[in-house]
Amino acid sequence: AQKVTQAQTEISVVEKEDVTLDCVYETRDTTYYLFWYKQPPSGELVFLIRRNSFDEQNEISGRYSWNFQKSTSSFNFTITASQVVDSAVYFCALSLLGMRFGAGTRLTVKP
Amino acid sequence: DSGVTQTPKHLITATGQRVTLRCSPRSGDLSVYWYQQSLDQGLQFLIQYYNGEERAKGNILERFSAQQFPDLHSELNLSSLELGDSALYFCASSADPFTEEAFFGQGTRLTVV
C-alpha cells in the first residue's frame, strides 16, 4: 500500500524562525516520485518540488530546502527565515499512477 | 498561472442533480488527472487519462465518470449528487504520466445544497 504521513497538523512560528515540515511515506515500489505542494488561502495548489526515488541529493531553492532520506522513507521540507507569506497548508505527495497526498500541515507565520 | 484551466470556478446545485466539470490541460500535456479535496477525506486521486484513454483509477465513486476528448480536454461528470460531494475538484496535467510534475488548475468549488 502507498501512504504519506504528515504527522504535524498545525505549526505556528514567528517570522524569521526556521521551520521543518515532516513527511514520511510508504511504498513497495522502487521507482516513485515525491512532491511538495503549497496551498495558500486562495486555494490553488502550487508546485514546489519533485524528487525521484533514485536522486537522494538534498536540494535548496532560496529559503526552501528539502532533505530526502530513503533509509527512513522521509522527505522533509525546511523553510529558513520564515515570512508571513509562507502561511499556507503544505502537502507532501507520493506519485505512482496518481498522487497520494498526505493530510497536510497548516503553517502559520506570525509577524 | 499553471496553464491548466478549469471551469466553472464555482458551482452550486441541488441534491440529486448532475454536473459537468471541465478541464483544459497545459498545451502539449497528454495526461490529465482529477482530484477531490474535501474536509473529511483530504486530497484524493480520482482518475487519470492519458491521450484519451483511462490510465489509472483511484477513489472514484460509480456515480462519477470522466472522459478525455481528442483535443485533450477532459470532463468530470458527477451524478445523483449528495451533500457529501461538496468539495473542491482539481484537475492536473502533465506531459508524461510517469515523470513530470503535475500542474494543477485553480479548482472548481462544488456546493451541493
Image: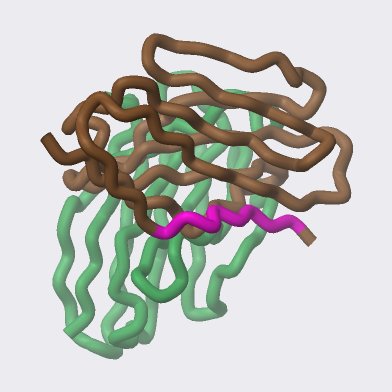
Chain colours: A brown, B green
Q: Is residue B10 left or right of residue B63?
A: left
Q: Is residue A47 left or right of residue A1?
A: left
Q: Tell me, yes or no, if residue B6 can be seen here.
A: no
Q: Tell me, yes or no, if residue A16 can be seen here.
A: yes
| Quadrant assignment for the N terminus of chain B | top left
x%, y% of residue B70? 51, 37
Tell me if residue A3 is in the magenta stretch.
yes
Residue at position x 60%, y 56% in the image:
A5
| Quadrant assignment for the C terminus of chain B | bottom left
Residue at position x 62%, y 26% in the image:
A67
Residue A90 vertical position relative to residue B29 in the rendered view, above or below? below
Q: Nearer the viewer, residue A83 or B46?
A: A83
Q: Is residue A54 left or right of residue B2?
A: right
Q: Nearer the viewer, residue A76 or A38?
A: A76
x%, y% of residue A22? 55, 44
Q: Quadrant of residue B4?
A: top left
Residue at position x 63%, y 53% in the image:
A4
Residue A15 vertical position relative to residue B69 in the rendered view, above or below? above
Q: What kind of secondary structure does the magenta stretch mostly adopt?
A: loop
Outermost residue toward the left in this view: A111
Residue at position x 31%, y 60% in the image:
B88
x%, y% of residue A12? 28, 48
Q: Nearer the viewer, residue A24 or B85?
A: A24
x%, y% of residue A11? 35, 50
Instruction: Report the number of discs.
Output: 0
Q: Nearer the viewer, residue A8 or A5?
A: A8
Q: Is residue A11 left or right of residue B13?
A: right
Q: Which residues are magenta?
A: A2-9
Tell me if residue A85 is in the magenta stretch.
no
Q: Quadrant of residue B36?
A: bottom left
